[in-house]
Amino acid sequence: MSNYHDQRGPRYSGQRNNPGRYGQQQRESFNFENKPFFDNKGELNPEWVKKEAQQLSHQLARQKNGMTTSSLRNFYNEFIRIRNLPKNNDAEKRILIRMLVAKVNYKKTTAKVPDDFVKFVSVLVEEINDDLDRFEKACYIMEAIIGYNPKK
């Protein structure tokens, strides 16, 4: 005699053939190598506001513990909050930019923040270093990622 749950198939029996979210396969991690955010002059790589931002945004949504739109927007809002601090707070801005890495690592332990986003923020902050002009341009990358985030 077969079990009722077995007749309904793997979807209902606790076994899953597809570990991905929304019927999609989980993809490999996003490759950040050879994809700098800025060139040697500090100019923003235009691919990061088009192709790369689109790919990363879709990758974040597809991952098993995909990033929610709310979590993504919260990080974007933090970027904008730092950018909008008064000009006489440059030292504080530099500290807060570096704190973004700590915040994203903390959120990884408490919320749906995939490793790819942690790596993205870490690499971005590393490339920004203490250059506030680069940080201004990094806000465009975050805005593009928000814009390309697939609606669920």
Image (cartoon, rainbow, N blue to C red):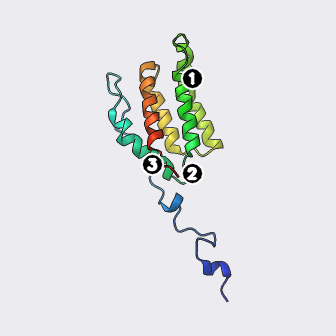
Question: Pointer 1: what residue?
Answer: 96
Tag 1 secondary structure: helix
Sequence order check, earlier mark of 2 and 3: 3
- Looking at the rendered structure, the kind of residue marked 3 is His
Determine the residue positioned at 32% across, 27% down: 39
User: Percent position (x, y) of residue 42?
Assistant: 35, 23
Tag 2 secondary structure: loop
User: Percent position (x, y) of residue 60?
Assistant: 49, 47
Residue 131 visible to the viewer? no
Q: Viewer-proximal residue, 70 or 43?
A: 70
Q: Residue furthest bottom?
A: 1
Q: Viewer-proximal residue, 102 or 138?
A: 138
Label 2 vs label 3, nearer the camera: 3
Residue 97 in the image: above or below residue 28: above
Q: Residues under labels 2 and 3: Cα distance?
A: 13 Å
Determine the residue positioned at 35% across, 42% down: 51
Image quadrant containing the N terminus: bottom right
Question: Pointer 2: what residue?
Answer: 65
- Looking at the rendered structure, the kind of residue marked 2 is Asn
Q: Viewer-proximal residue, 4 or 149?
A: 149
Determine the residue positioned at 55% across, 13% down: 89
Sequence order check, earlier mark of 2 and 1: 2
Tag 3 secondary structure: helix
37 horizontally vs 121: left or right? left
